[in-house]
Image (spheres, rainbow, N blue to C red):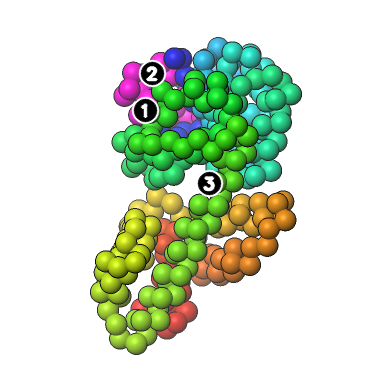
Amino acid sequence: MNIGFIGLGQMGHNMASRLLERGYALTVWNRSAAPAEDCRRRGATVAASPAALSTCDAVITMLADDAAVDAVWIDSGLLQQMPATTLHLNMASVSLAMGRRLAALHATAGTPYVAAPVFGRPEAAAGGQLDIVAAGTASNLARCVPLFEALGRRWFNVGSDPACANIVKIARNFLLGSIIESLGEAFALVGKSGVDRAAFLDILTSTSMNCPAYRNYGQFILNEPAQPTFTLNLGLKDIDLALKAGQDSGVPMPLAALLQEQHRAAIAEGYGEREWAALGGFIAQQAGLK
């Protein structure tokens, strides 16, 4: 397969590098030149414009947000320029509204489309260890399976409507925000009474809460990484997506509203570019703990 790749941020760059390692012919485009040049050194072709990717068998987009998708894929007219033989595989996190819009536009244009957002951080992308949630027609998904197997350790089929994959990603990240908030509050509660927080985390993850989310985010709260791979600002973006999806779907989400308030307060205190789990540190600060 000849693959196009648009969007070479931390995640996209590592995903593109993984495809190159697996022997794919890759053509890349990115709004800033440096990541694309690094991919060129690894064997990729660098396109002068996104339109140059129209000859590819599939084009993966890993753009930052709805606005970037709108600018690069829709408003530019690129979607309408794509031939019916080129599949669009959108692996980025977008809003439910954008997910539905992309699906509708592709259906109208008669071009194949699959939504397949990913779970995992840049290091997982580099090692082909992402978890992938995908939705689209059976024939379109079948075309993507080799790519899923190159990029991920497992992929999940959540139906024929591409927007279903987007809402699964949104709901899952909302739950991660809830875990960080609740861990931060619980750590502050026991810490204020003199209990060692590391010992408390060991108790949690040795009993009923023995799962990666509690172990990993608990450790990130106790020992914040010096170089964040997912910032609190990005966490707020995911909480905003959950609230908007709730509004669009008629689902009350009072906990999401609380999380949004907490994220905004932490950002106002300078936590925005720190690791997402630094929200726990903000909660400790509000409780008067170091």
Query: Residue 69: x and y, percent?
Result: 62, 35
Near-viewer residue (48 or 259): 259
Near-viewer residue (33 or 206): 206
Number of other residues with Cα within 10 Å of mark 1, as a class: few under 14, some 14 to 19, many 20 or more: many
Residue 106 in sight in this render:
yes
- SS for tag 3? helix
| Residue marked by disc 3 | 169
The answer to whether mark 2 and mark 1 are in CB contact below 8 A is yes
Mark found first going from the N terminus, 1 or 3: 1
Between the C-alphas of marks 1 and 3, the distance is 20 Å
Between the C-alphas of marks 3 and 2, the distance is 27 Å
Residue displayed at 30% across by 74% down: 200
Residue 24 tag number: 2
Mark found first going from the N terminus, 3 or 2: 2
Between the C-alphas of marks 2 and 1, the distance is 10 Å
Residue 31 in sight in this render:
no
**Would residue 50 appear left or right of 150 to someone viewing this image?**
right
Number of other residues with Cα within 10 Å of mark 2, as a class: few under 14, some 14 to 19, many 20 or more: some
